[in-house]
Image: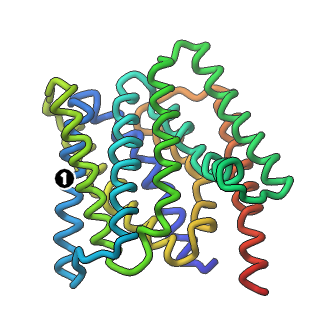
Amino acid sequence: MDFRAIVMGIAFALMWSSAFTSARIIVADASPLASLALRFLVSGLLGVGIARAVGQDWRLTGPQWRATILFGVCQNGLYLGMNFLAMQTVEAGVAAIVASSLPLLVAFAGWAVFGERLPGRALAGLAAGFGGVTLIMWARLSGGVDPAGVALCFGAAVALTVATLAVRNASSGGNLLMIVGLQMLVGAACTGLAAVLFEPLSVRWTPSLVAAFLYTTLVPGLLATWVWFALVQRIGAVRAATFHFLNPFFGIAVAAVVLDEALGPVDVLGVAVIMAAILAVQRARAAPAGRLARS
């Protein structure tokens, strides 16, 4: 893994993790699904416009179209939609910790559903990682965290797991920025329809709302997604997912600094366990691929 890939991975993890804090600010002043649909619409139009300006088009391959639609529905419509709804009652740090279980869920799905062979240390890492998440959630639920909000966060993590399994098809064959823009527009359609059907429109215009909306639209929304796809193309999905081990730390750190969310000793311990578990699982999964590439 070269220096550029390392910088891209760290930058992606920081941008991705900061989205929970900006989302928490947005839903305090605006309807969650409507604001998310507007974010996707702006990000999507910008992405498609820039892609056209640099010579990309929307004549994608069949697998690219299928994966782009699936990614748009699962990541943008379901994952972010459920997280925005949850953020009305759940702290940003809690949502970030649940979402950081993505590499563990992906590895578990590969093992349980697709029959992927995992070394013993990877299985131990899975058990430790889920144990760390359980430890934090048990403490938070005992402290009065909304169970329905936590359930939405876990549902969102499952949806993101499905979306992640589609990344390889979505990012192969060129037109990377166009794919990012198109999957944002798919998300805009999903969340916009849900907002019209189920959500009363409410907006209280404040400087923090405007700043958070612009940030989440341009940085976690457009830039982080492009960096992720570019990183997957550069080093592969398994190695790129290693950087998710930084998400629990970045997620709670940004929330603590910006939102002044409290951190207890159980949170710190649980995050340390999750980070170590994610790193162990990803290194164990990458090892067979590395041996295969050298053979």
The image quadrant where one finds the C terminus is: bottom right
Which residue lies at the image location 78% right of the left edge and 78% below the top edge? 291
Q: Nearer the viewer, residue 101 or 276?
A: 101
Q: Quadrant of the N terminus?
A: bottom right
Q: Secondary structure at mark 1?
A: helix
Q: Position of residue 82 (x, y in %)?
A: 38, 34
Query: Of residues 284 and 135, which is closer to you in this image?
Result: 284
Q: Which residue is mark 1?
A: 41
User: With 189 as the anchor, is 227 left or right in this view?
Assistant: right
Q: Residue at x 16, y 23 (%)?
A: 200
Residue 135, above or below 52: above
Task: Report x, y in % for residue 68.
Answer: 35, 62
Depth order, front residue of 217/53? 53
Task: Write the residue at 46% across / 69% down.
Answer: 169
> Which image quarter: residue 43?
bottom left
In which quarter of the view is residue 248 placed? top right
The residue type indicated by label 1 comes to Leu
> Which residue occupies the foreground of this view, 105 or 87?
105
| 223 relative to 233, above or below | above
Q: Residue at x 64, y 20 (%)?
A: 139
